[in-house]
Amino acid sequence: MDGFALAQLGIDIDRFEDEGIITEGDRITQKVVDLADGERSTVQLERCTDGGQMRYCDPLTGNDVVLPAKHARRWKVDLNWLREEIITALGSALVGVRGRHLGEEPVFLGEIDIDGHSVALYFAAKMSNQRQYAKVDSALRLRPSAMPGIVLTTASVPFPFAGTNVVIPIENVLATGQSATAIDIAQLKAAYRQNQLAARGGAAVELKVSPDGNSAVLHIPEKAPWQVTSKGKIAVLQRLVNAYASGTPHISTKILMDGTNCASPSTLFTQKSSPWRNYLTAVKGARAWQLKVQSLDEVVHDDESEIEVVEEALTN
């Protein structure tokens, strides 16, 4: 975590470093500051003559703002200690069983009430790391829930979802000023509400590709968003999404796999933990594939046939 976040949690960095709970990491060279009307700006952090201080130029006043150098640094934190600090920071808003751990991570912390629903709260570190994300995502997919949950993480820019859970950086929901808890519960709930629908797959089928084109997230209603990397996999998913949008959802295997050097999705999505079969399905009677989307034709109606009515009458 960065020193700014630790300071907002009320952590004495010097003392905790001496006790070995936190250890020094990389220096931070930028900081996001609040401007007028809710806008934010990124400023450059520069060293001061005094080695214990850093400074930046206030974009509104042009004046130098000096801050402790220990804040402008990332710190490696003992995770067991941090989990307990998070539980304390949530205060009385956290209810439910704390001891129900899902292996090592993600760690179940409890539940919070959001709009009358009990929302599970988890903790997982480093959710911007591909390997860590895959581990947590796989674990949470094995424990589906009627309501999307929340995963608090130490990463500043994490993957946005894990299973059907919203991933939220701890530093984004820390309270400022006078507050009964170190974590701003209202801000936590707002971040959850903003991303709750997307965590369930969104309202429409779409593929969101990252600006660099190296990763993408597939959204299908009522399914957990699926994060993939590699341009070959992205190309296959994009073809399937385009076919679905065109009204003819199936696409031949040959066209689908063109340029991937793979014969079928099963040889492209080879990781054991890959959930690809939950999102892609072969078309029966054809060498073709399509997205696994709930069709309106499959909706069960409550109209009963005459036989069913007679059978019900005989059994009553």
Image (tube, grey):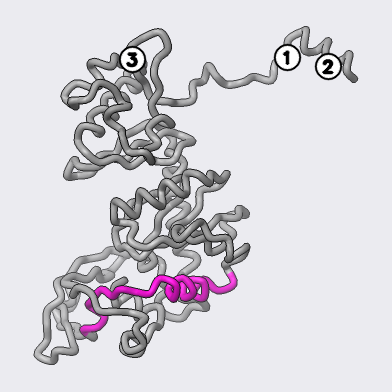
Give me the residue at 37% from left, 63% from top.
125
- Could you say which quadrant of the image residue 53 lies in? bottom left
Q: The residue tagged with tag 1: helix, strand or loop?
A: loop
Q: Is residue 132 left or right of residue 307?
A: left
Query: Which residue reaches farthest bottom?
Result: 50
Task: Name which of mark 3 and mark 1 comes first in the sequence.
Answer: 3
Residue 180, position in %: x, y?
Answer: 52, 78
| Cα gap from disc 2 to disc 1, whole angstroms | 10 Å
Give me the residue at 18% from left, 77% from top.
58
| 140 falls in the magenta region | no
Q: Is residue 131 above or below residue 260?
A: below
Q: Nearer the viewer, residue 286 or 218?
A: 286
* Res. 196 visible in picture: no
Could you tell me if the residues under marks 2 and 1 are in contact, i.e. CB atoms within 8 Å? yes
Dot 3 corresponds to which residue? 288
- Could you say which quadrant of the image residue 105 lies in? bottom left
Task: Name which of mark 2 and mark 1 comes first in the sequence.
Answer: 1
Dot 2 corresponds to which residue? 312
Residue 209, position in %: x, y?
Answer: 25, 39
Query: Magenta residues?
Result: 69-92
Residue 8, position in %: x, y?
Answer: 37, 78
Q: Amino acid at mark 2?
A: Glu
Dot 1 corresponds to which residue? 304
